[in-house]
Image: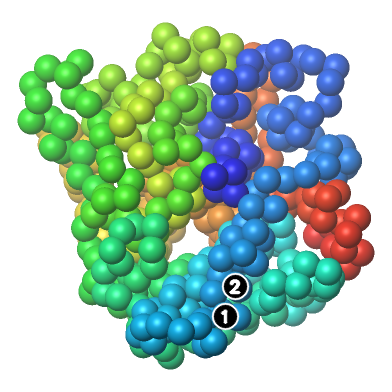
Amino acid sequence: GAAFNMNRLSLVVNDMYLLAYNVPNTISSNVLTIDKVLLTYDESVDRSDLTPTDPRYDGLYKNIAMVANIVLMNADEASGDKMLLEQLKAEAYVLRAYMHFLLVNMYAKAYDPGTASTDGGIPYVTDVNFEEVNVKKTVKEVYDNMLADLEASFALNSLPDKPKNSMRIGKPFAYALKAKVLMSMRDYVGALSAANEALKYNSTLEDHRSLLSEPVLENRVLTRDGLQAEDNLFYAFSNSFDPSLVTPTYEILSNYYEPGNIIKDHTTVYDYQMGPIYVGLPDIPAWIAIGYEGNSGGMTVSDLVMMKAECLIRTNKLQDGMVEIEKIRIRRLHPDVYVPLSASTEAEAMLHLKKVSRIEFLYTWRNFVNIKRWNAEGTYAETIHRTLNGQTYTLEPNSPLYIFPFPQSATQFNETLTQNY
């Protein structure tokens, strides 16, 4: 549902434009909207004034209170199969940690070991008492709580090796989330260990080469069953047909897609007639593959492989890291043009990783969280440029636009919720 609509995150990092809104009209309009602010990277506007409500904020906290916390508060008293109840508790701990992970990465600064203990975070909600004000915690407290929830889940020893469908939680996703949390904390050794643990249970990557077995380009239909997709670790979306109808930016098309990309160059997924109709920009295609159920709000084995690659590169195992990156590339590029990349320095390897990662996680929350993490660390920070109708808009690595405002519906009720930017 709306809790997992990540389009605004994609808009901030210039992965996509608006969803079926005319971009030039939005920019030239006298009406100030969040879309206009984010399209033009306008830091002068107080975005909280333009955010009466926020379905992502409300939806993620609703999942915490109404799903995870209700299970955790009632499972011990419930009658019935104790093993099943323990499994539900273990899943609930992971779900609670994951919802908070998404929230803290949207509404607070990225984790910085030097300042996390004083940086403003988000409330970490462990009850279902709606009358009580949940005090805003620091970023460090939020991360400590997420790790504690994950450890509580592992301690129950009841997560399945493979969940019965990808909207349920098993060991692969729990370890994947632990890896994500530790990566955010710059613990690459710990993150690598967790990613490797997850890969023991699921190492299946989506493979686009199978599309090429159909000789006629127009007949190549990109499909994916979200619930059953083998590479899904946890499946979450706002529309089942995500990412259909979204449009990549000029910069993504020219700077990030590699020549020979199977979806872009060897299928009709990108519709160059519909794109300009949707967003009012020439030569911008729309992704249209209604039968493809992308995982915009969850995680896949691609997350594990890219995390493993980065952890290896950052712990001085460059070539091992490059091997992981190639596992993705070989499944995305036409065999006629595929050539493995090489790197002799960490900086070169990270450049390759960032480029491959950007397309692999297009139209999901991952690019926003990764870029924000790299920016906070500094070594691989990036300044984003978006050029529209001859005008270039710039997003600096330390821009407040990387921190979303708490909605008025929350700040009016909870006075500890001061904005984090």
Identify the residue shown where x is 91% and y is 55%: 412
The image quadrant of residue 12 is top right
Identify the residue shown where x is 50% and y is 73%: 92
Label disc, if present, on residue 74 of the rendered structure: 1
Nearest the viewer among 378 and 52 is 52
Q: In this view, does 47 lie to the left or right of 236?
A: right
> Where residue 388 sits in the image (x, y, percent)?
63, 19
Q: Is residue 185 left or right of residue 176?
A: right
Nearest the viewer among 313 and 327 is 327
Report whether residue 404 is seen: yes
Identify the residue shown where x is 88% and y is 68%: 416
> Where residue 248 sits in the image (x, y, percent)?
48, 28
Image quarter (top left, top right, bottom left or bottom right) of the N terminus = top right
How far separated are the C-alphas under marks 2 and 1? 6 Å
Instruction: Give the vertical position of 153 relative to 380 (above or below).
Output: below
- The residue that label 2 is drawn on is 70
Look at label 1 and name its amino acid: Asn
Instruction: Give the vertical position of 420 relative to 36 (above or below).
Output: below
In the orientation shown, which residue stands out farthest toward the front? Answer: 79
Identify the residue shown where x is 64% and y is 52%: 59
Report whether residue 182 is seen: no
The image quadrant of residue 391 is top right
Q: How crowded is mark 2: few (under 14 residues within 10 Å), some or many (20 or more)?
A: some
Instruction: Give the vertical position of 161 relative to 253 (above or below).
Output: below
> Where residue 111 sits in the image (x, y, percent)?
64, 69
Instruction: Give the vertical position of 222 relative to 379 (above or below).
Output: above
Image quarter (top left, top right, bottom left or bottom right) of the C terminus = bottom right
Q: In this view, does 166 lie to the left or right of 212?
A: right
Q: Are marks 2 and 1 in contact (CB under 8 Å)?
A: yes
Q: How crowded is mark 1: few (under 14 residues within 10 Å), some or many (20 or more)?
A: few
> Where residue 327 sits in the image (x, y, percent)?
22, 54
